[in-house]
Amino acid sequence: MNERLRKVQRALFPRIDGKKLRFRGGWFALPIYLVVISMYPLSLQHADWVEISEQFWWVALTGVAIGTLLGNGRMRFPRAMLAGSTLGMLVITLSTTFASTAGSTFHDKLTHLAILVNNWITQVLAGEAASDPTVFVLFLGASVWCATCTRTSSCSRSRSSCCSCASTS
């Protein structure tokens, strides 16, 4: 039974090869890439579309880190994208919950977020106009995750040094 659990653990969490784990543009291009990647979430914050927008920059940095790990890993592309999507869902939900102003404990904030999403879905299915921006905040977080994690993972897999900075513009 222990051998079976080890096989499942190795299949889900493959070992990271330290020799391959590097940023493709080198240490010089990494700060440039982070500045270019940061423009999208920071522009969303400055647009003032929603009140809760501080988490977008952290979602972008987490997306770059996870995208680098997935892109340099030995996982097949479909599995890496599924893992990135699952991690993105968790990161977006957690960061939006922590950024929420309702409640004092994590449980209260998460419950409030779930109630707002449920109310939004109920209003939309009933044909009413939904005015709560919570789902829009989650959508913006998902777009930041897709822009950073997917781009970083794809550039890491392409093995091109100029792909990182060139694909962001």
Image: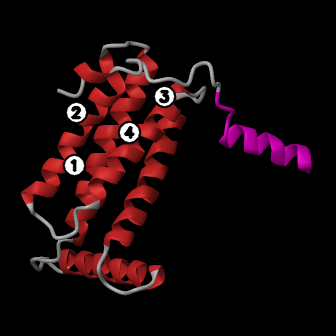
| Crowd class of label 4 (few under 14; some 14 to 19; many from 20; radius 10 Å) | many
* Residue 52: image tag: none
Local SS, label 4: helix
- Residue 20, percent across and down? 57, 19
Residue 8 place in picture, x, y as percent:
76, 44
* Residue marked by disc 3: 71
SS at badge 2: helix
Q: Which residues are magenta?
A: 1-16
- In percent of the image, x 29 and y 79: which residue is there? 101
Residue that carries the numbered disc 2 in the rendered image:
36
Q: Say what amino acid the circle numbered 4 marks.
A: Cys
What amino acid does circle 3 point to? Gly
For discs 3 and 2, the disc positioned in front in the rendered view: 2
Q: Nearer the viewer, residue 99 or 120?
A: 99
Residue bearing mark 1: 41
Q: Residues within 10 Å of mark 2 (few under 14, many from 20)?
A: some
Which amino acid lies under the numbered mark 1 shown in the image of this protein?
Pro
CA gap, disc 4 and disc 3 = 9 Å
**What's the mark number on residue 149?**
4
Q: Nearer the viewer, mark 1 or mark 3?
A: 1
User: Which of the marked residues, 1 or 4, is nearer the chain's N terminus?
Assistant: 1
Residue type at mark 2 is Val
Quarter that holds the C terminus: top left
